[in-house]
Amino acid sequence: MSPRRVRPYDMGGSRGDTERGTERAVLSIEQERFGVTNEGAKVDRFLLRNGAMELGVITLGAIVQSLSVPDRDGHMADIVLGYDSLDGYLQDTAYFGAVVGRFANRIAGGQFTLDGVEHEVPCNDRGNALHGGPEGFNRQVWSARATRSVDQVSVELTHLSPDGAMGFPGNLSVTVRYTLERSAVRVAYAASTDKPTVLNLTQHTYFNLHGQGSGTVESHVLTIPASRYLPVDASGIPIGPPAPVDGTPFDFRSPKSVGRDLRAGTVQLATSRGFDHSFLIDGRHGGRLAPAGRVEEPVSGRVLEVLTDQPAVQLYTGNMLDGSLVGKGQRTYRQSDGLCLETQHLPDSPNRDTYPNVVLRPGETWRSTTIWRF
């Protein structure tokens, strides 16, 4: 279904304003109908602009549907993989641009015990529960509202996950706010519950800084400030304690191209058909924002810096893209046509006492922030 414009939001200011007013004049938010689900739920698209970039977010899955940023010559390009219409997202199996939860990444066997009570999440990936199960947050239609300040535009999306949804305990209220801040996108999460539950949220956008649909990201130059990573078994579940990256293809502490070691032939790369591993971020202190990754695209000159307060980042190189998904502009997506830097907690944390805590209890508010800076 083609998007239908509903209304623009007046950002104030005019072209005749000076200094601050001129800056305000380029701020805008438009809301448009993106489609209707098979169950009849209306899905809207919010288009945010601030003069430096343009962000499109849809209410299905709180999905980042588009993100246009300039290259070194000021030419704009959409740098995230996805679809032109709602139909693509309704059939999507790659989690393009979605907020995933309640528990991002994998829970072994779909089972965990919390306060002595066993819980079971439907398995949807090689015998494990992936990204909250088959009907996770990416499949839900979120409520949304646009907001603004003097020099920022935002869209805030909210979802109430009922007690027992996908086997998780507690009525969980989740809010995700996307804000354009000059040349950055701030992704701010908040959540609360009425029963103890487990929580791990992330943003699953696939980036290609040369432009979505332009081919492989293997020439992108990547840096991840992590001296340890988690080796996994054939189903993506950690097989032991974190291992040092030193002397392995997983060492991104110094800049190197994504493709340099992608086909190094190690057991870990063969197991995951590429990089699909959690890296423990160095230099984190007390939940403060810390660098989690830097991506440079040499042709366009675009650079993405990722900052987060989460303990880890999952590097995923689009290993399962096989040409069967046709994205925006009728582009066919193939293996390594995009990469994800998913800021999050560690996989299978509900079953690992030695991992950072992922339990949220009543009376607490879970908050997290990730920034994409261009």
Image: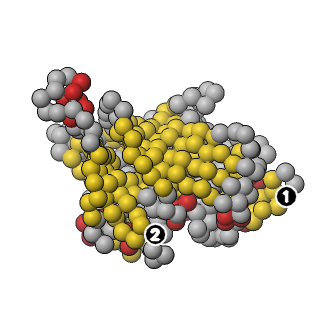
Q: Position of residue 98 (x, y in %)?
A: 47, 57
Q: Position of residue 115 (x, y in %)?
A: 84, 51
Q: Residue at x 61, y 31 (%)?
A: 287
Decide if residue 338 is in sight here: no
Element type where label 2 sits in the image? loop
Residue contact at pointers 2 and 1, CB within 8 angstroms: no
Q: Position of residue 13 (x, y in %)?
A: 21, 32
Which residue is labeled 2 in the image? 41
Closer to the camera: disc 2 or disc 1? 2
Which residue is labeled 1 in the image? 117
In the image shown, does 205 or 35 lie closer to the viewer? 35
Q: CA distance from mark 2 to mark 1?
A: 35 Å
The disc at residue 301 is none
Earlier in the chain: of badge 2 and badge 1, it is 2
Q: Residue at x 25, y 32 (%)?
A: 24
Q: Is residue 284 left or right of residue 16?
A: right
Q: Position of residue 210 (x, y in %)?
A: 27, 50
**Amino acid found under the numbered disc labelled 1:** Val
In the image shown, does 102 or 15 lie closer to the viewer? 15
Q: Quadrant of the N terminus?
A: bottom left
Q: In the picture shown, does residue 177 fall above or below 2?
A: above
Element type where label 1 sits in the image? strand
